Image (tube, helix red, strand yellow):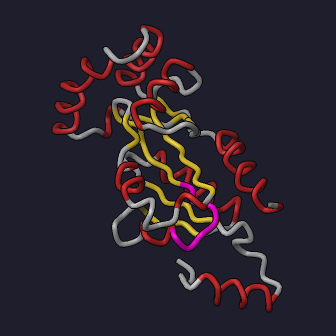
Amino acid sequence: MRNPNRTASKRRREAKGDTSNKYDALVIYNSANGSTTEYAKMIAEALDCDIVPYSRKYIAYASLYRNVIFGTWIRAGELVNLQLLKKNSGNFDLGSKNLIIYGTGIAPVDDPSYQTFVKDRNSVSDMYFLPGKFDPKKVSKTAKASLGAMQETMYSQYSDTVENVMRERFKNGYDGISKDAIIPILEDVISTANE
């Protein structure tokens, strides 16, 4: 993490002609099996910006940046740990920031019914859906039992198409990670540079 004193850091960068973090962006990521982390690293590298794992220790850094990119995984339609960020929105002055949210998962991310369900469930009007990954061989016995118990409840919330795709991906595994998936997020941040 670079110096959190953004004003001093920005002045030093400008004096040296340093263009690092020229988009004044921070990526905060919350990951369960690595998909969100992979995307967070791709985004941070492409924008040459700061990146921190999601934790109470680091989340307050959101108040120091113009662009805050929050990435998390989607569990049964829930954007995991988004609520803590939302509850502290006033503390972090998120209303004045360009808050970008992305969620990773194994559901077919381009399915409109799935997107609407996730947005409604989390009370977000705009977000990016990125294809994640899942390896059934790497799931612990405890997580497998929990996932098995949760799946039937989870599937009842989705269309038959989404349910069938998810069942197949849970059974056989899935890796949809793609650098192209972050392009709209990068464009969103870059578009604020001229504002």
Q: Is residue 174 above or below residue 34?
A: above
Q: Position of residue 61 (x, y in %)?
A: 48, 72
Total label count?
0
User: Which residue sits at x=17%, y=37%?
Assistant: 141
Q: Position of residue 154 (x, y in %)?
A: 30, 22
User: Which residue sits at x=55%, y=33%?
Assistant: 176
Q: Position of residue 21 (x, y in %)?
A: 69, 71
User: Which residue sits at x=58%, y=54%?
Assistant: 99
Q: Is residue 132 above or below residue 47?
A: above
Q: Is residue 141 above or below residue 8?
A: above
Q: Is residue 93 left or right of residue 6?
A: left
Residue 66 among those drawn in magenta = yes
Q: Residue furthest top?
A: 160
Q: Is residue 72 left or right of residue 24?
A: left
Segment tinted magenta in the rendering: 63-69
Closer to the camera in the image, 32 or 83? 83
Q: Position of residue 81 (x, y in %)?
A: 35, 50
The quadrant of the picture occupied by the C terminus is: bottom right
User: Which residue sits at x=54%, y=47%?
Assistant: 101
The picture quadrant where one finds residue 49 is bottom right
Residue 119 among those drawn in magenta = no
